[in-house]
Image (spheres, rainbow, N blue to C red):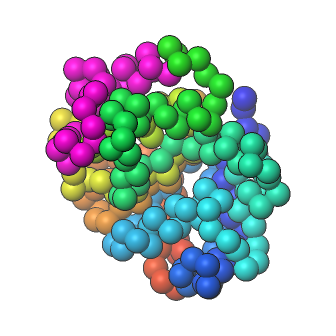
Amino acid sequence: MAQDGPVLDIRAAQPSFDESGMAPVPVDLRLMPGDCAVIECRDFARATLFADLCSGMIALASGSVRFMGLDWTELGDRQLYALRGRIGRITRRGSWLDLFGTHQNIILQQLHHTTRPTDDVVADAMRLGMAFGFPGLPLTGPGRLSAADLARAACVRAFLGRPDLLVLEDISDMLPPDATVAFLEAITAARDRGAAVMWFARHAATWADYRPAVNVHLRLLDEGLFPVRGV
C-alpha cells in the first residue's frame, strides 16, 4: 500500500528519562517514502535507544511518534504487532534465540507479525540469504555462527518482507566486505519501492560509498538530534 504522508513522523518527542535513561530532550524527525537518513552516532547504546523510540518501544513524557500515520501510543497489541511487522531492523544486540536454528530466527518476525504463508517467507529468505553470501539459510544455532555470518543473517532478517521502514544499526565492523554491495543494493531496492531508511553509522567511511544517495544527514548526541550540513 502506497504511503502518501511521512513513513516516520517524530514530533517534539521527549523520552521519559525514568523509564528509558535517554536524555529528556525533544526530538523531531520526518522521513518520507524513499528517504535515506544517515545518523552519525558513536555510542551504540544511544543508537539502540533511539531506534527503540522510533519503533514505539520507549515511553514518552511528551510529543508523539507516528509510523505509517499511526501513533504508537494509541494502538492495541494486535495493531502494534502488525505495524512492527513492517519495520526491518538490524540491532547491535543481535536478539538471537539459541533455542531455534538461525533460519527459524530469520523468519520468526515475519511469521509472528504478518499473515504471509510460510512457504513465501522461506522462499524470500532463501533469495536474500544467497544475495548476502549464504548457500541457503544457515540451519545451525546462532551461537555457533561466526560474527560475519551473524551479520549476514541480520541483514537477511532486516530486509525480509518488503519493510516500509528500515532501522539499521551499525554492524560495519562485522559485515564482511563481500556482503557490502548486497547491503547497499538492498537499501536502494527498498527505497525504490517507497521504504524509508534510517542508517546509524559510527564513522564516515561506513557510508562513504553511498553518500551521493543519502538525502538526510543527522548527528545523534546526548543533547539531541541535529542536522549536518553539506551532504
Residue 21 is left or right of residue 99, and the answer is right
Q: Position of residue 158 (x, y in %)?
A: 45, 40
Residue 20 visible? The answer is yes
Q: Place residue 123 in its image quadrant.
A: top left
Residue 72 is left or right of residue 152, and the answer is right
Residue at 50% of width from left, 68% of height from top?
49
Let me know if residue 176 is in the magenta part: no
Q: Nearer the viewer, residue 135 or 6?
A: 135
Residue at 67% of width from left, 71% of height from top?
59
Q: Residue furthest front?
A: 99
Q: Place residue 187 in its image quadrant.
A: top left
The answer to whether 31 is drawn above or below residue 1 in the figure is: below
Q: Position of residue 1 (x, y in %)?
A: 72, 29
Residue 219 visible? The answer is no
The answer to whether 221 is drawn above or below residue 65 in the figure is: below
The answer to whether 125 is drawn above or below residue 69 in the figure is: above
Residue at 44% of width from left, 20% of height from top?
122
The residue segment tinted magenta is 121-149
User: In which quadrant of the rendered image does the C terminus lie?
Assistant: bottom left
Residue at 37% of width from left, 25% of height from top?
128
Q: Position of residue 178 (x, y in %)?
A: 18, 35
Residue 109 is left or right of residue 8, and the answer is left
Q: How many marks?
A: 0
Let me know if residue 129 is in the magenta part: yes
Q: Position of residue 221 (x, y in %)?
A: 46, 79
Q: Nearer the viewer, residue 193 or 109?
A: 109
